[in-house]
Amino acid sequence: MSTMQHTDVLIIGAGPSGSSAAALLRQKGYQVTIIEKQHFPRFSIGESLLPQSMVFLEEAGLLDTVREHVEQFAFQFKNGAAFLKGKQRSFYDFREKFTDGPGTTWQVRRANFDHLLAQQAENYGAEIRFGHEVIDVNVEPEHPLLTVKDEQQNVYQIQGKFLLDASGFGRILPKFLELESPSDFPVRRAVFTHIEDGILDDPDFDREKILISVHAKDPRAWYWLIPFADGRSSFGVVAEQDFFEKYGFDGSAEQDLEALFKRILADEESLSQVLRNAQFDTPVRTLVGYSANVKHLADRNYALLGNAGEFLDPVFSSGVTIALKSSSLAIPLVDQVLQGQPVNWMEQYEKPLRSGIQVFRAYVESWYSGEFQDVVFSKNQDEKIRRMVSSLLAGYAWDSSNPIHKNAKKRLSTLAEYCREPASLETDLSGV
């Protein structure tokens, strides 16, 4: 093993949370070393950004580099979300929302998007070690220590004054430090791919919005269709395992996922019509049991960012927004630690971050219970309610001035009742 190496801040993972954290730290002059197991560009799911994320990208100095590559990588301008359930259609324009801030963003191929962010972090002076794997973690010393293996199987140790876990679904610190806590969400599976969507001049389809479709026979199951600007789309279906079993899928690696996907699509007449000319030309993938939680998000010399700490569900595309928000919250506190100042990680990081995550959680749960579907497809929403809902869908889950933010689960339930029986309730939510 080689001589001990040192850096100011160690980051595990070069995805959006890791790259934005590195960019923010470099603004403050710290030496940053990122350990990344994979090589970029690499495939990642989660292509539909939320407008709130634009605020955090700009803060980290990453927004301009994304703007400069919009045409090159066919990033699709996005201004809202559309919903489809049988013959019912609904949409929200994120520019018409309760909360101030950007109302538009992009739908991106994450391979290109993540690579751009990582390259810009390198341009700012961060060191990214691609193809290096963390094989041990020690946070007992004052300065945390990683044992790392490179692609030539050389093993070395590197010590930082602070450690950030931005490993996403790799969840390095939760595994090594036994921080994992069971998610209370049901185990769900996603089946997904990229397709040549073949959608030409369809008056019922808007490329500037993600399309979320509810399965005709099981409202717990839903499809995403995320168009890019070059005629291709990310396409997926999410449901509990018993749903897939009805289509003959037992979870084995030998089964034909493309054939499975097409059988499920055929049961949704309206979406099948939208995708009548689609070509499945990319291998279909699956991910199961992705929801995760941890006992805590930070301690005296480390913090978890983004999906390494908690992942809810892909239904409202909150993953990248939570990742970027976590970096935005954490880096000023890391700066305080490195300056020798006290930090209360629970009060200053975990509680503020989880306040927004809990709002996202409330309407994910409400979606699967059917209540938020009642809201989305209701024709009885007044403009005030639409703007509140639009803000949540646009990612502004930390806006405590939005009446839906406080007691979000209860207020979404009240909204659903109002939308079903508009004459029975007041639209003012302040007294809920």
Image (spheres, rainbow, N blue to C red):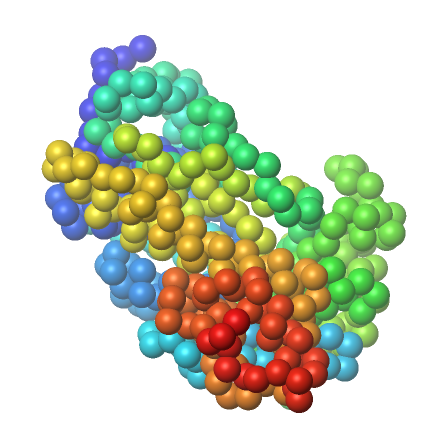
Quarter of the image with the N terminus is top left
Q: Position of residue 255 (x, y in %)?
A: 80, 42
Asked if 219 appears above or below 286 in the picture, the reply is below
Asked if 377 appears above or below 1 in the picture, the reply is below
Front residue of 253/9: it is 9
Q: At 14% across and 37% down in the image, what residue appears?
A: 341
Q: At 64% across and 74% down in the image, what residue appears?
A: 416
Q: Position of residue 146 (x, y in %)?
A: 34, 23
Q: Position of residue 246 (x, y in %)?
A: 87, 52
Asked if 309 appears above or below 180 in the picture, the reply is below
Is residue 393 shown left or right of residue 421? left
Is residue 178 shown left or right of residue 400? right
Q: Is residue 339 visible?
A: yes
Q: At 27% across and 13% down in the image, what residue appears?
A: 2
Q: Is residue 171 visible?
A: no
Image quadrant in which you'd find residue 91 = bottom right
Front residue of 106/56: it is 56
Q: At 36% across and 52% down in the image, what residue appears?
A: 352
Q: Position of residue 167 (x, y in %)?
A: 43, 38
Is residue 392 shown left or right of residue 286? left
